[in-house]
Amino acid sequence: MKFLIPIFIINILCTGNLDSLAIGEVSEYRAMNSKSVLPALCWSLGATIIPVSVGLNLGGIPGGTGVAFGLIAGPSFGHFYAQQWKRGYVSTLTRIGLIGVGIGLVCVTTSNDEGPLEEHFDEIFGALALPYIAYLGTMFYDFLTLPNSVNKYNQAQEKTGKLHLNPLLDCRNKKYGLSLRYNL
């Protein structure tokens, strides 16, 4: 049950509207259908960190499955939150492919040699270096492109021709009101 506490905390952070208030000026709450970068980042970090930490605590095959899920699919969850499915799936499949390339390179490197794998550590390390660097690059790519995915989603929502009724808040003067906006 202890592992549910971080999940609960990240869930609160992901569903909160932490970035919508501007102090001292009239600001609109974001439209009900728009998304923010902070929850997208929370989804990516949470879907990476939580399965990895729970998996490391569990150990064995269930733990290894959790670690693999967190490291392969976790960084893409922010793109899934922003409904940028293609970007999320492509980067997840790229990471799976890089793992396959790494396994293939290790097999090719050690296939002609006899003896235990410990004797071939330098060769295995050399074979895994490039796929590992590319793998980390795809993870950073996911985190760095989250704002772009969220912006694409929000721009698509603004072009839907919907009527938006948003609350207004002026924190300095303690005033509030409503904003009516129609997007073509």
Image: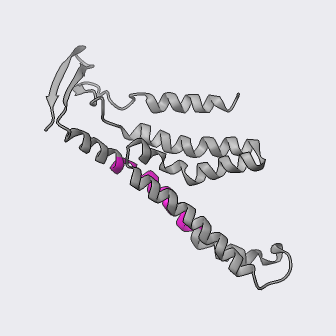
Magenta-span inclusion, residue 74: no
The answer to whether 63 is drawn above or below residue 7 in the figure is below
Estimate the x, y position of residue 131 in percent, counting from the top left. 58, 70
Left or right, 168 with respect to 131, comes to left
Magenta stretch: dominant secondary structure = helix
Q: In the rendered view, tell whether residue 10 sits above or below residue 72.
A: above
In the depicted view, which residue is nearer to us: 109 or 132? 109
- Measured as percent of width and height from the top left, residue 104 is found at 65, 74
Region of the chain picked out in magenta, as a range: 132-149
User: Which residue is the extreme one toward the bottom?
Assistant: 112
| Percent coordinates x, y for residue 96 in the rendering | 57, 61
* Residue shown at 37% from the left, 49% from the top: 84
Residue ID at (29%, 25%): 23
Taking the spot 34% from the left edge, 37% from the top edge, the residue there is 35
Residue 156: quarter of image: top left
- Residue at the farthest right position: 115
